[in-house]
Amino acid sequence: MPAALRIQLTKEEDKSLQELSLADNVPRRVKQRASLPKGGASLTHYD
């Protein structure tokens, strides 16, 4: 089994992905991809 992904997001990047996943004016595929890092990987926030 491959190793789990570890993604390091800044607070700004996390906020941008959250906004994309909740926006009404973006395609469904973009929303799904914006929410993927949160559901499929271990996230660490750095300031």
Image: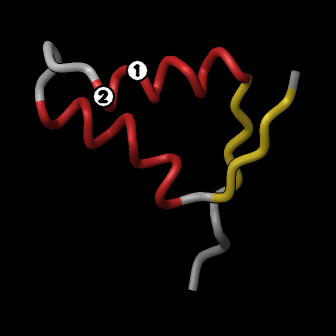
Residue at x 11%, y 25% (from the top left corner): 27
Residue at x 38%, y 34% (from the top left corner): 34
Q: Quadrant of the N terminus?
A: bottom right
Provide the residue designation for mark 1: 19
Provide the residue designation for mark 2: 22
- Pick the residue in front: 3 or 37: 37
| Quarter-of-image position of residue 30 | top left
Q: Amino acid at mark 2?
A: Leu
Cβ atoms under marks 2 and 1 closer than 8 Å? yes
Left or right: residue 14 compared with residue 28? right
Q: Amino acid at mark 1?
A: Glu
| Quarter-of-image position of residue 33 | top left
Outermost residue, bottom side: 1
Image coloring type: secondary structure
On the image, the x and y values in percent for residue 47 come to 88, 21
On the image, the x and y values in percent for residue 11 come to 71, 22
Left or right: residue 17 compared with residue 34? right
Residue at x 16%, y 19% (from the top left corner): 24
* Numbered label tally: 2
On the image, the x and y values in percent for residue 29 come to 17, 36
Give the structural element (helix, strand or loop) at label 1: helix
Is 18 located above or below residue 44 in the figure? above
Give the structural element (helix, strand or loop) at label 2: helix
| Quarter-of-image position of residue 13 | top right
On the image, the x and y values in percent for residue 3 come to 66, 73
- How far is disc 2 from disc 1 in space, using C-alphas? 5 Å
Left or right: residue 3 compared with residue 23? right
The crowding category of the residue bearing disc 2, from other C-alpha atoms within 10 Å (few below 14, some 14 to 19, many at least 20), is few
